[in-house]
Amino acid sequence: MKILVPVKRVIDPYVKIRVKPDGTGVETHQVKMVMNPFDEIALEEAIRLKEKGVVSEIICISIGDKTCQETLRHGLALGADRAILVEDNESRHSDIISKVLHQIVQKESVQLVLMGKQSIDSDANQTPQMLAARLNWPQATFVSKLTCLDSQLLVVRETDAGLEQLKLSLPAVVSVDLRLNTPRYATLPNIMKSRAKPLSIQSISDFDLGQTHQMLVTELISRPPVRQRGVMLENIKQLLEKIRPIIAS
Amino acid sequence: MSTLLWIEHDEKTIHPACLSAITAAQQLSKPVHALVIGNNVNHIVKQVSLLEGIEKVVSCQASYYYPFRAEPVSTLLVSMIHNYSHLLAISSTQSKNILPRVAGYLDCPMLTDVIEIVTPTCFVRPIYAGNALMKQTCHSKPIILSIRASQFEKTGLTDSCCPVESIAPQPNDERTEVIAEAIRDTEKPDLQTAKIVVSGGRAFGSAEQFNMVQQLADELGAAVGATRAAVDAGFIANDYQVGQTGKVVAPELYIAIGISGAVQHLAGMKDSKTIIAINKDADAPIFEIASYGLVGDLFKLVPEMIAEIKKDHHK
């Protein structure tokens, strides 16, 4: 079984972001960038499936500018077999990304797409579900446990209400949650070896982006209002005086 | 033009956040129709038909519509959406599972977690875990969005029922099947709708000691929350996690105990009305956003607080 793992290059989650004063976006110049943490978990799961002999090939894909090659090399060092960069200098919404992935899935005839539930920059949580719809494949989102059974997957999903066990048939799109696994680190020998692995570069202009191109327009990126620092109290008695009216209301 | 609001429920009651979604729907386009899907939902339909702001309830029942699965539910939504300019739901794991799939079928974009409706086509939503806000204009038909309920007032009841229309179900999709569900204790207040939330961090040190959070919450009639660190340390189950990767809450009162205030946690609670922080480190970032702070040892302060509240109850 061939498996596709889309990976997004994002600002390191531990970096405090700076909103550009002109409202056009968030400063990324000379800011540490990493693979989206949820995508890294998806890749780790793909590697584990390959180690179990369930998966024959892992393809990593990223859509973005040249610097995404670094993210893809990291994916190759972790254990992906080959990588595809769809070079694109524009920032795209989930609907366009899912459209590009749809075409890649068809071209590469993959059977399973494993991806992060959301990217930690746009926080949209849409691309996996949109891709599943475009392919008309079944989907499982927020997955925290995954077992492969021949032509089926057995997964545990994390929902607001608790946990849900879902069975779905392949081919399928699966989006992963935080607790699925703990990703490994790339070892030095694997980093060296990854340089010999294939990384093909395609252009966004080779893909049909259709009509939805301008349906969603970003007007402004701004800083949220800052909460004022409050009052420091001395003891529990003072604290209770503050909260009693709220409890009683 | 009109708005279709997908009503989330658990077959027993409406998700309380839907009351806020009805308010949001009034700002999109009227009339607002509510869609109730499920296996056995006549009583939910009745509840919804009495809500202020709903002009018609559309109901669709079939055994395979509950528990909700994205495949059959999105097929149904796609089949009936052509009459509407907006499709709206509350932001939740359910809507996140279903709505983008509808958008995918319709070749439309979508807006998740909208916190402000500027105009019926212009919206504000948080990005970077709430560290930035993005204003977007959407030109698709329909416009598909989910809203953060805490940012909108709740609607009330009316005296008279609105009309109800039953529609025929669409075919099932047997490629997915729910095998089992482990539902959290529903006797306790729900984290996302509770008036008061008491949250604990890794400073509690063990699952046994984390129990103090539950005890305090019980005394206050509050829901329990936790940081990702406390969840990762195994003190409490994941569905209690508040933060960027967990639940986003905005109660009247949020009590953060032994929580330093990592960006990822603040993203999930900083819109709470009043925030109380108890932490032994006076420099903890949580104090930057707390309405009231108290520096001290939680193992002394929390039992003292529980004892004081118990005394209040006996008065």
Image: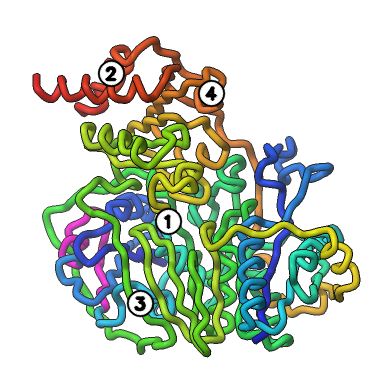
Q: Depth-wise, is mark 1 or mark 3 nearer the camera?
A: 3
Closer to us: B135 or A27: A27
Tell me the quarter of the picture where residue B176 sits.
bottom left
Contact check, label 4 and label 2, Cβ < 8 Å: no
Contact check, label 3 and label 4, Cβ < 8 Å: no
Q: Alpha carbon of mark 3 to alpha carbon of mark 4: how far? A: 44 Å
Q: In the image, are marks 1 and 3 on the same chain?
A: yes
Q: Chain of mark 3?
A: B
Q: Alpha carbon of mark 2 to alpha carbon of mark 1: how far? A: 33 Å
Query: On screen, A15 above or below A61?
Result: above
Q: Spot the residue most to the left.
A: B315
Is A85 left, or right, of A160 in this rendering? right
Q: How many C-alpha atoms fall within 10 Å of the one at disc 4: few (<14), some, or many (≥20)? A: some
Element type at mark 1: loop
Residues in magenta, as a range:
B45-60
- Which residue in the structure is indicated by mark 2? A240
Query: Tag on residue B288?
Result: 4
Query: Tag on residue B178?
Result: 3
Instruction: Tell me which label, 1 or 4, sits earlier in the chain.
Output: 1
Element type at mark 3: strand
Is residue B263 in the magenta section? no
Q: Alpha carbon of mark 2 to alpha carbon of mark 3: how far? A: 46 Å
